[in-house]
Amino acid sequence: MCTQPVVRVVLVGSLMPDDVRRGYISPKDKVINFQFSKIIQEKFLREYNISRIFCASDIFVEPEYFLLEKKIVLESKLRNRDYGNLAGRNLKSLSAEEQGQFMNPEYAPVDGESMYAFHARLKGCLDNLFDKAKNQETFLIIASPVVIRALSACIIADDIKNSFCILNKLDVHPESWSIFSGRIGNWRILTLSAPF
């Protein structure tokens, strides 16, 4: 009999910054203001027994819009990838060599982190949830769509190396929610990128 708890994870994707939608690489320490819809919050309260709420440290949820009565834990491990010296640049301004390196999961820009390190950080954060989890708990995670997409790939993949292949087959829209349930290493997709 397995002693690992069964948990549900509700992933909520925030808005995307306007400059990122125009093709710019996200600047370091860019904070996204996110007004989490009261209607969606009420839906989560009604349908799910949310026990803990984690919010990426680069997301700011307007307190007056927050109905959930749980304490929000700001989690720095859920922040966006650190792009180092590439942060703030337009993707079109990258040379062909820089674009090739940018797509390499093991490449780390100067003063930044590789895609591999980004995924390993997120996977570690997920694994830590299970260290504290009780059976049948539901966690709510609020992060940018980029992070939700990477978390989803980490959840679906058998290991970190496979998460990069899965990442390119997923899309997560801003202001959407995804739900996964299962035990560590054994997940089921219940909802993926459903719009609010």
Image (tube, rainbow, N blue to C red):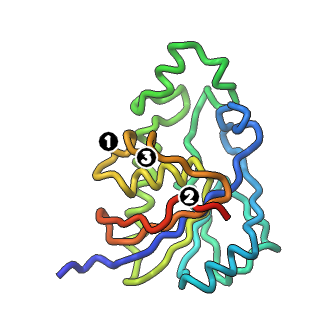
Residue 176 position by quadrant: bottom right
Q: Identity of the amino acid at label 2?
A: Ser
Image quarter of residue 63: bottom right
Q: Which label's residue is closer to the chain start, 2 or 3?
A: 3
The residue to which callout 1 is attached is 161
Q: Which of label 2 and label 3 is nearer to you? A: 2
Could you tell me which secondary element the residue under label 1 belongs to? helix
Under circle 2, the secondary element is strand
Check disc 2 and report the residue beneath it. Answer: 193
Q: Residues within 10 Å of mark 3 (few under 14, many from 20)?
A: many
In this view, the residue in front, 43 or 105, is 43
Query: Image point 42% across, 62% down: which residue?
Result: 126
Q: Which residue does the image show at 66% across and 20% down from the upper left?
A: 92
Picture coordinates of residue 133, whole percent (x, y): 41, 77
Name the disc covering residue 34, or none.
Answer: none
Q: Position of residue 192 (x, y in %)?
A: 51, 60
- In the picture, measured across the screen, residue 155 lies left or right of residue 43, that is left
